[in-house]
Image: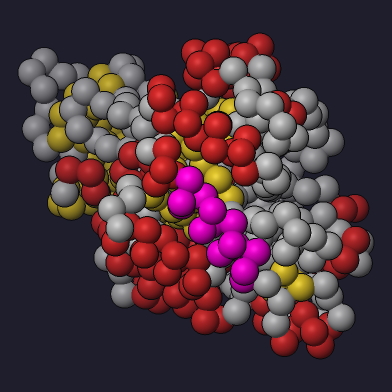
C-alpha cells in the first residue's frame, strides 16, 4: 500500500527534523519526506493537520505476560495496548514462566508476536538459567533466536563471580547486558522507600543503598570486563551520581527510568495505595526531581513504561500483600509529554528519549527514525488535547495504575507498523 501522510508536523529526532511536511510510504518503508517520489500514487491519504508525525515509539521494558501468566494479560491484549499507545517496538524482560532462557521459548514468543502483525517484539534473554544466578545461559544461541540483550529482570545475581563470568562472556561477543541495580540483602523483605513515609506507615523499607551498593559492583565489573552495560529502571539521585562518576572515568554505560518515577514519589502511597507498589520503590521527591532533570539533560538516556499488568485481585490486597507493578504501555507517551511540558523540554528532545535514544540502547537500526528506507513504523498523535485516564480507555488487560482519573496530554490518532494502519482511521 502507498500511504500519503499530509499536513503534519514531522518530528524525527534522529535526523534533526522538525518541520511541517508530508511523509510518503511505499509498502513497508518510508519512501520520502517533503516531495513525493517519482510516480507515487497514494492508495490512502491521512490528514495529519494539527498532529505530530513521529517515529513509532520504542519501549525498553514491557512485560507481555506470555508465556505463563496469561491470566494477567495475553499477547493479543498487550499488543492492542501498544498500538493504542503508539508503541511499535518493545523489549520484553525474561521473567516469564518458563523463563526466557532457551532458544525454543524465544522463537515461540517471536513467532506468536509476528503472527499478530502488531508491535515488533524484541525479547531480552535470561542472563542465567531460570534467573537463578548460578549458571550462564547459552547467549549465542539466544541471540540467534532473537534476543537483543540479557538481563536478570528483578532478580539479582548473588554470586558476583557468576556475574563477572557472564559479563566476560557477553563482552567477548559484544552482547548487551541490562541490569537492574538491586542488592538482594538490603532490599530483602522491603516494599517501600526507606524514609519517613514507610516509617510512619509501618512498611518495611528499602534504602537507596540497595541500589547504589549493587550499582557500584556492576560498574566496577563492567569497567573490568568491557561489557556493554545498560542500567534499567534507575530510581535514585545517588544512583545517577554513581553513573556520572563511572562515565567521568571513561565507562560507556547507559541507563533508563520508568516513566512513573518521573511523576510519583513515596508520598503518593497515601493511605496504603497498592497501585503505587512497584520495584524498585517510588523514592523521595528529591530522587524524583533528580531523575526528571537527568532525563532532560541526557544523563538518563531513555524512558520506558516498565509495563507490568497485574490482575485486580492481586492489587486489591493490602499494600504489603499486593503484587508490585503498574500498567504503562498506553501511558508512556502522555506521561512523557507531561514531564516534558513541566520540565521545559522541547517536544523533539522528549520524543528522542522514546525513539532514537531507545533504539540505540537496543541496538536496532530499522526503527526509531523516519529516514527514507527506514521501516515505516509511525506514530501520529495530538500533543495538546487532554484525555482522562480510565479503565474503559485502557486496552491492556491490566488496569493497575495510580494515574486513573488523571488528565494527560497526547492522544494517539494513528499507529502504523511496516506501512499498515494498525490503530486509528
Q: Main secondary structure of the magenta part?
A: helix
Residue 379: x and y in percent read 38, 42
Q: Describe residue 363's horizontal placement relative to residue 331 as left or right.
A: left
Q: Describe residue 346's horizontal placement relative to residue 148 as left or right.
A: left
Q: In this picture, is 49 found above or below 103?
A: below
Residue located 61% across and 38% down the image: 161
Residue located 72% across and 32% down the image: 134
Residue located 15% across and 35% down the image: 33
On whether residue 209 falls in the magenta region, the answer is: yes
In the rendered image, which quarter is residue 346 located in?
bottom left
On whether residue 82 falls in the magenta region, the answer is: no
Res 187 visible = yes
Q: Describe residue 8's horizontal placement relative to residue 354 as left or right.
A: left
Image quarter of the C terminus: top left
Task: From the viewer's side, name the closer residue of 280 and 402.
Answer: 280
Image quarter of the N terminus: top left
Residue 183: x and y in percent read 67, 57
Residue 407: x and y in percent read 56, 70
Residue located 84% across and 36% down the image: 71
Q: How is the image coloured?
A: secondary structure
Q: In this picture, is 171 found above or below 242?
A: above
Q: How many marks?
A: 0
Please state the extent of the stretch shown in magenta in the rendering. 208-221
Res 402 visible = no
Residue 417: x and y in percent read 42, 28
Q: In this picture, is 103 found above or below 390?
A: above
In the rendered image, which quarter is residue 420 located in?
top left
Amino acid at each position: 500500500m502507498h500511504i500519503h501522510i499530509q499536513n503534519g508536523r514531522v518530528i524525527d529526532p534522529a535526523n534533526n527534523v522538525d518541520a511541517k511536511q508530508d511523509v510518503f510510504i511505499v509498502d513497508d518503508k518510508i519512501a520520502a519526506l517533503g516531495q513525493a517520489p517519482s510516480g507515487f500514487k497514494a492508495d490512502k491519504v491521512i490528514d495529519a493537520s494539527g498532529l505530530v508525525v513521529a517515529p513509532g515509539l520504542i519501549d525498553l521494558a514491557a512485560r507481555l505476560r506470555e508465556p505463563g501468566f496469561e491470566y494477567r494479560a495475553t499477547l493479543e491484549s498487550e499488543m492492542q495496548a501498544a498500538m493504542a499507545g503508539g508503541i511499535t517496538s518493545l523489549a520484553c524482560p525474561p521473567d516469564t514462566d518458563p523463563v526466557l532462557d532457551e532458544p525454543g521459548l524465544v522463537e515461540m514468543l517471536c513467532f506468536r508476536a509476528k503472527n499478530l502483525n502488531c508491535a515488533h517484539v524484541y525479547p531480552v534473554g535470561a542472563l542465567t538459567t531460570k534467573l537463578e544466578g548460578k549458571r550462564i545461559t547459552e547467549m549465542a544461541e539466544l541471540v540467534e533466536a532473537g534476543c537483543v540483550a540479557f538481563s536478570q529482570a528483578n532478580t539479582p545475581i548473588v554470586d558476583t563471580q557468576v556475574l563477572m563470568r557472564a559479563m566476560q562472556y557477553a563482552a567477548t561477543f559484544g552482547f548487551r547486558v541490562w541490569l537492574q541495580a538491586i542488592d538482594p540483602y538490603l532490599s530483602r523483605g522491603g516494599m517501600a522507600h526507606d524514609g519517613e513515609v514507610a516509617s510512619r506507615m509501618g512498611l518495611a523499607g528499602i534504602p537507596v543503598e540497595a541500589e547504589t551498593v549493587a550499582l557500584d559492583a556492576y560498574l566496577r565489573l563492567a569497567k573490568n570486563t568491557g561489557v556493554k552495560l545498560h542500567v534499567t529502571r534507575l530510581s535514585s539521585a545517588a544512583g545517577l551520581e554513581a553513573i556520572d562518576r563511572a562515565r567521568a572515568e571513561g565507562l560507556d554505560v547507559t541507563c533508563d527510568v520508568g516513566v512513573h518515577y518521573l511523576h510519583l514519589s513515596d508520598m503518593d502511597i497515601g493511605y496504603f495505595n497498592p497501585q503505587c507498589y512497584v520495584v524498585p520503590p517510588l523514592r523521595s521527591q528529591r530522587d524524583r526531581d533528580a531523575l526528571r532533570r537527568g532525563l532532560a539533560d541526557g544523563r538518563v538516556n531513555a524512558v520506558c513504561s516498565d509495563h507490568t499488568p497485574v490482575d485486580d485481585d492481586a492489587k486489591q490486597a493490602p499494600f504489603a500483600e499486593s503484587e508490585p507493578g503498574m500498567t504503562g504501555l498506553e501511558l508512556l507517551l502522555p506521561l512523557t509529554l507531561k514531564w516534558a511540558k513541566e520540565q521545559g523540554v522541547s517536544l523533539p528532545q522528549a520524543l528522542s528519549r522514546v525513539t532514537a535514544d531507545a533504539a540505540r540502547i537496543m541496538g536496532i537500526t530499522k526503527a526509531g527514525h523516519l529516514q527514507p528506507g527506514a521501516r515505516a513504523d509511525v506514530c501520529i498523535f495530538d500533543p495538546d488535547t487532554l484525555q482522562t485516564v480510565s479503565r474503559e480507555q485502557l486496552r491492556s488487560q491490566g488496569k493497575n495504575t495510580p494515574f486513573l482519573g488523571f488528565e494527560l496530554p497526547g492522544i494517539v490518532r494513528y499507529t502504523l507498523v511496516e506501512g499498515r494502519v494498525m490503530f486509528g482511521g
